[in-house]
């Protein structure tokens, strides 16, 4: 299957282990030396309309992707535990640690 960036951008990212919806593909990371796609980027969700900051952005390495389907991208559970449910980037954490 050959996809353009606009096709990949509309796909939803889902964890293979428990089916948690991670988000959508917002950006890609390309190695300019080898011309290979190395990672997909999903921007962190806002907390309370952005007033309390947002979750960290998620970088999903290409080897963590299990399947790219028509509507969704299925990833390993390792990527889920790596970012969203760990550190939060918020206004309060910047001032008070």
Image: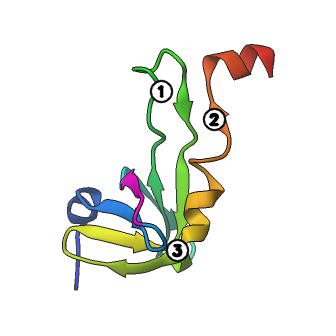
Query: Given contact means CB atoms under 8 Å apart, are the residues at marks 1 and 3 in contact?
Result: no
Residue 25 lies, with reference to residue 46, above or below; the image says below
- Looking at this view, is 45 or 5 the one in front? 45
Q: Which residues are magenta?
A: 19-23
Residue indicated by mark 2: 88
Can you tell which quarter of the image residue 43 is in? top left
Q: Is 78 left or right of 13, judged from the image as shown?
A: right
The tag earlier along the polypeptide, 1 or 3, is 1
Can you tell which quarter of the image residue 70 is in? bottom left
- Specify the label residue 47 is tagged with: 1
x, y percent for residue 7: 20, 64
Quadrant where the image shows the N terminus: bottom left
Q: Is 41 left or right of 71, judged from the image as shown?
A: right
Residue indicated by mark 3: 76
Determine the residue positioned at 56% across, 48% down.
Answer: 84
Query: Given contact means CB atoms under 8 Å apart, are the residues at marks 2 and 1 in contact?
Result: yes
Q: Is 81 left or right of 38, judged from the image as shown?
A: right
Residue 97 lies, with reference to residue 95, above or below; the image says below
| Secondary structure mainly formed by the magenta segment | strand
Q: Secondary structure at mark 3?
A: loop
């Amino acid at each position: 299957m050959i996809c353009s960036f606009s096709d990949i951008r509309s796909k939803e990212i889902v964890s293979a282990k428990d089916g948690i919806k991670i988000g959508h593909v917002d950006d890609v990371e390309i190695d300019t030396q080898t011309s290979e796609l190395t990672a997909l980027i999903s921007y962190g969700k806002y907390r309370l309309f952005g007033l309390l900051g947002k979750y960290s952005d998620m970088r999903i390495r290409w080897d963590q992707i299990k399947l790219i389907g028509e509507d969704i991208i299925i990833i390993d559970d390792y990527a889920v535990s790596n970012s969203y449910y760990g550190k939060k980037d918020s206004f309060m954490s910047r001032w008070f640690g």
